Image: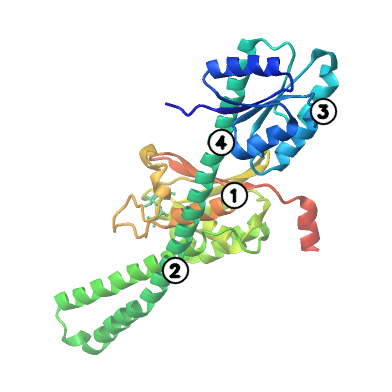
Amino acid sequence: MAKSAKIINVDDSEQARYVRARVLSRAGFIVHDAATGSECLKLIAEHAPDLVLLDVNLPDLHGTEVCRRIRSSPAGESVIVLQISASAVAAPQATAGLESGADAYLIEPVDPDVLVATVRALLRLRKAEGDLSAANERLNILNRELQRSNEDLEQFAFAASHDLHEPLRTVASFASLLEKTAGAKLTDVELKYLEYISEGARRMQALIDNLLTYSQVGQKPKSPQIVDLNAALAWAIENLRKRICESEAEISSDPLPSVTGDTGQLGHVFQNLIGNAMKYARPGIKPVVRLSAVQENDHWLILVRDNGIGIDSAYFQSIFGALKRLHGKEIPGTGLGLAVCRRVVEAHGGKIWVESTPGEGSTFCFTLPANVDSDDVAQLTK
Ligand code: ADP
């Protein structure tokens, strides 16, 4: 059963006090009576009540003063104060009472049912407030834990991928040395084995590089700059130049905006999306990639559209998860490209998703806050 709420019933009129105490006890509350303001303050310290029913006109202290003192005492900070006053002086007193910290106000004569219902409503409200702040507190604790465990994980991924470089380099260089020195004496099968070792080392190297990038891009940019996305795109295209020439891809873009963030990280997003557009092209069809941007309220929507193999809607969400691939070894990859894109975009305050029709192509869409005005850019490019 729920614990009965404790009420301090304050009135200098014995009769009024008696009537209210009866009504409230019958309604199931635990009632302590006080005839003066000082007695009320003493009982609050003793009983830590849930609610104080406070008559305004007391012999020693005025109701508003009692209220002020309740609010400034440790035991009274969160107690509910319901003031009651005579009708003749109601309006100014109501204002003064509420401003001095009372939660609600009733005017004499108070109907017993209205009194009980008001007390119950105020208690419900206070309980809901308590539940909400407890839930908030729990949420804050969970958030802090999540942040800590994310940071741990990032540090772990960084350290692990860093430490894996060295032994991997040893495997790759000895495999190549063996091929050079003993290649002529090895059988075709043995040479094939060596090739598998080198290929495995190359794939592992790519995985480690991508894991390193993934572990580094999760944080909000430490020193955000104004990023001209046209320049970030040019950087990405430059890095992909060889693959663009080989696949004869056609890449075009509308003018892109400037945003706040990290140039390198946003360049990586373009590099991964355009790289994928070429990698997942339809056989025999030249990749065509078109970039565009539109401003929607407080953010930019950037679109990267391709004419590739497309993606089944069942995978629209999961492809952004780390190490998630829809293809086997026939198409090289680590399953981290889109996960990196998501981390970068989210760390910049945006969202990323895909729209696609299998067999026709995909459009990768992402948002970035539109918080750079043209004056900032002009200032910077002077
Ligand atoms: P990876 O390309 O290394 O496999 P990504 O994280 O970049 O990893 O992509 C995850 C998966 O999403 C890919 O394996 C691929 O199946 C699918 N995908 C990504 N981009 C495209 C695209 N433009 N067209 C079709 N499928 C794509």
State the separation of the CA atoms marked 1 and 4.
31 Å
For marks 3 and 4, the one nearer the N-term is: 3
Q: Quadrant of the C terminus?
A: bottom right
State the separation of the CA atoms marked 2 and 3.
61 Å
Residue positioned 71% across, 38% down in the render: 71
Q: Which residue is mark 4?
A: 130
User: Residue 221, relative to residue 182: is it above or below?
Assistant: above
Q: Position of residue 163 (x, y in %)?
A: 39, 76
Q: Amino acid at mark 2?
A: Phe
State the separation of the CA atoms marked 4 and 2.
42 Å
Q: Position of residue 25 (x, y in %)?
A: 55, 19
Q: Which residue is mark 3?
A: 96
CB under 8 Å between discs 3 and 4: no
Q: Which residue is mark 1?
A: 349
Image quadrant of residue 106? Answer: top right
State the separation of the CA atoms marked 3 and 4.
26 Å
Which one is closest to the eye, mark 3 or mark 4? 3
User: Residue 381, relative to residue 64: is it above or below?
Assistant: below
Q: Secondary structure at mark 4?
A: helix
Judge: label 2 CB < 8 Å from ligand 1.
no
Q: Amino acid at mark 1?
A: Gly
